[in-house]
């Protein structure tokens, strides 16, 4: 008998009528021959009510007690759901996270799952019950109640699907699938029938509210198909699986992250260990750094910019202040009125000119790009918050995301991919539920590094630069633009070393046209890449990388990050030592393939 995990979010169980409707969906699935596990969130705004109550009695409630309080929201939902199923003539048992045996670490309000006991759930399923699990919660080794943080019920659902070897995980929500961008922001957004794990990981981290990135990490790690569906209609929804919707279209979605804050350290020493000193202090406060931009240095000095969630700006600045005492930057600036606009696509690396097109459409509407960061499947630009909505619409239209690709599948099916068949390996992975998993560490010696420095910081600069490079038939890999200073900007990128001379000549022409700026380059560069699941949600990954490279005396010239990969550019002669240093640093979490 197949097993399905169904998750119902807060809007799907907001009142008793909706709870009964969800109960009917579970009963229908069971009568179709499936065993069913339901994961239920707190009703509607219940969690917000509980948070408000806590704030009424304490300005700074203890994290442990917040977990105790917030976990009650899901307990109300699961009990009512079990009652509704019973009233409809079927058998159901509700369980808290502790009763299931969801073990977590002790990081209150954002705990990570360590393991899940399955015997009780399986026994109840075999007895003909629909098992209703409280999402968002677990217990630590001292039996304290913990909560999993934002998106915790999604995480619970996919984790249960993984450990129970479920055939699929259905996520019921107030939208009827995954869209090319948020349909509440852009009405012309298109629902996609299928999207790849890596694409959804990027979109989730960029603000797509349908799914949380931790749950997608689980799904990818254990090959669990996720079916995002509406609680209120029978529209087919969207499958999140291994393959994208289209094998020919380079961009599958666009996203906007409105509430970002940008911090820049100007004029810091360009030497090994600098990034380590900065980001280890930030990681110690469990802050997820997003867009990291570091340019080629000038006169032994470099600038580093990065973004964090706006609500974590204050605590991040405290960490930066500690690092500044050692690094002694010439200046530290921040801006809490910025937004990030991004495009994502699994085929992006195979189709030239994607970045050029994005910069060109933004330039055509006079939108100034403050910073650029790219990876193999993502291009992100930082813009003024006042320009963000317009920028998203321009990019979405520019890549024709509202138009269905010709090779979009007419029908999709959820087939679980079980890439590991050795039971011992599976058990070991399940014991390490949310541990960091590194798939690959690579060295690419074929890279050349170029930069245009001190060009005018105005709309269209990036478009002008990359149109010139693209006109020479040169494929670009990593692109970095740092925040402008004194009316000028710096743009760096990598390309094949065989194209270095052509790229250098193209940049000299651009500088001449602009009437200002200079070209710098390094024909012998190397790219070191660390790929895996959970790179961003595990705040210590960057620290581990920087520590390994610093200990080996290796300086980082450029840095780019994504959900599934971190790239650093170094001198070519430091590539091999850097590879060995990273392999040693991550050997405890490197998956043996």
Image (tube, rainbow, N blue to C red):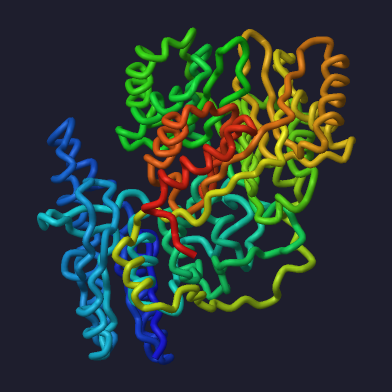
Q: Position of residue 199 (x, y in %)?
A: 58, 55
- Which of the pair 376/146 is nearer the observer? 376
At x 33% / y 61%, what residue is drawn? Answer: 433
**Can you name the residue that lies furthest to the left here?**
142
Whether residue 83 can be seen here:
no
At x 34% / y 28%, what residue is drawn? Answer: 281
Q: Position of residue 56 (x, y in %)?
A: 17, 36
At x 43% / y 51%, what residue is drawn? Answer: 534
| Residue 353 in the image: above or below residue 180 | above
* Left-right relation of 409 to 502: left
At x 53% / y 49%, what residue is drawn? Answer: 441
The mark total stands at 0
Q: Position of residue 468 (x, y in %)?
A: 86, 30
Quarter holding residue 427: bottom left
* Left-right relation of 505 to 433: right
Whether residue 48 can be seen here:
yes
Quarter holding residue 28: bottom left
**The N terminus is located in which quarter?**
bottom left
* Left-right relation of 204 to 28: right
| Residue 140 in the image: above or below residue 78 | above
- Which of the pair 304/38 is nearer the observer? 304
| Residue 224 in the image: above or below residue 297 | below
Q: Position of residue 2 (x, y in %)?
A: 41, 87
């Amino acid at each position: 008998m197949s097993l399905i995990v169904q998750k119902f979010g807060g809007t799907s169980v907001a009142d008793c009528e909706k709870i009964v409707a969800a109960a009917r969906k579970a009963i229908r699935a069971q009568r179709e021959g499936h065993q069913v596990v339901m994961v239920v969130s707190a009703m509607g705004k219940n969690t917000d009510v509980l948070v408000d109550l806590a704030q009424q009695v304490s300005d700074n409630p203890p994290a442990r007690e917040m977990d105790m309080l917030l976990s009650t929201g899901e307990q109300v939902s699961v009990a009512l759901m079990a009652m509704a199923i019973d009233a409809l003539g079927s058998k159901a048992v509700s369980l808290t996270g502790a009763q299931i045996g969801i073990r977590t670490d002790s990081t209150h309000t954002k705990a990570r799952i360590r393991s899940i006991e399955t015997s009780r759930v399986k026994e109840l399923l075999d007895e003909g019950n629909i098992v209703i699990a409280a999402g968002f919660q677990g217990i630590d080794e001292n039996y304290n109640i913990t909560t999993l943080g934002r998106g915790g019920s999604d995480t619970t659902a996919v984790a249960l699907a993984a450990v129970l070897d479920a055939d699929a995980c259905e996520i019921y929500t107030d939208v009827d699938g995954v869209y090319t961008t948020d349909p509440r922001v852009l009405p012309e957004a298109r629902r996609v029938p299928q999207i790849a794990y890596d694409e959804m990981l990027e979109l989730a981290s960029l603000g797509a509210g349908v799914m949380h990135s931790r749950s997608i990490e689980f799904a990818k790690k254990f090959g669990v198909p996720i079916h995002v569906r509406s609680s209120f209609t029978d529209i087919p929804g969207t499958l999140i699986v291994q393959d994208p919707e289209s094998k020919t279209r380079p961009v599958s979605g666009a996203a906007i992250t409105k509430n970002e804050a940008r911090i820049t350290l100007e004029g810091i020493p360009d030497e090994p260990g600098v990034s380590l000193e900065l980001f280890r202090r930030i990681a110690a406060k469990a802050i997820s750094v997003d867009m990291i931009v570091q340019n080629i240095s000038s006169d032994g000095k470099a600038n580093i910019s990065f973004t964090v969630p706006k609500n974590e700006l204050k605590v991040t600045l405290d960490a930066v202040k500690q690092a500044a005492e050692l690094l002694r930057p010439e200046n530290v600036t921040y801006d809490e009125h910025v937004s990030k606009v991004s495009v994502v696509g699994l085929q992006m690396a195979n189709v030239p000119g994607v970045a050029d097109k994005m910069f060109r459409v933004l330039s055509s509407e006079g939108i100034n790009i403050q910073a650029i960061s790219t990876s193999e499947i993502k291009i992100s630009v930082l813009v003024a918050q006042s320009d963000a909505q317009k920028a998203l619409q321009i990019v979405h239209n520019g890549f024709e995301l509202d138009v269905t690709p010709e090779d979009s599948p007419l029908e999709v099916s959820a087939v679980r991919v079980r890439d590991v068949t050795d039971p011992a390996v599976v058990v070991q992975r399940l014991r390490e539920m949310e541990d960091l998993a590194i798939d690959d560490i690579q060295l690419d010696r074929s890279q050349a590094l170029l930069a245009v420095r001190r060009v005018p910081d105005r709309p269209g600069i990036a478009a002008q630069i990359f149109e010139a490079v693209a006109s020479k038939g040169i494929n670009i890999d990593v692109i970095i633009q740092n925040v402008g200073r004194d009316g000028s900007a710096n743009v760096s990128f990598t390309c094949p070393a065989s194209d270095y001379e052509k790229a250098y000549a193209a940049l000299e022409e651009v500088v001449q046209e602009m009437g200002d700026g200079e070209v710098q380059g390094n024909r012998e560069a190397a790219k070191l890449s660390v790929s895996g699941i959970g790179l961003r949600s595990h705040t210590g990954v960057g620290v581990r990388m920087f520590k390994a490279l610093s200990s080996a005396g290796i300086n980082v010239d450029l840095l780019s990050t994504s959900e599934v990969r971190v790239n650093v550019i170094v001198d070519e002669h430091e590539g091999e030592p850097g590879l060995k240093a990273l392999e040693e640093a991550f050997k405890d979490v490197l998956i043996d393939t």
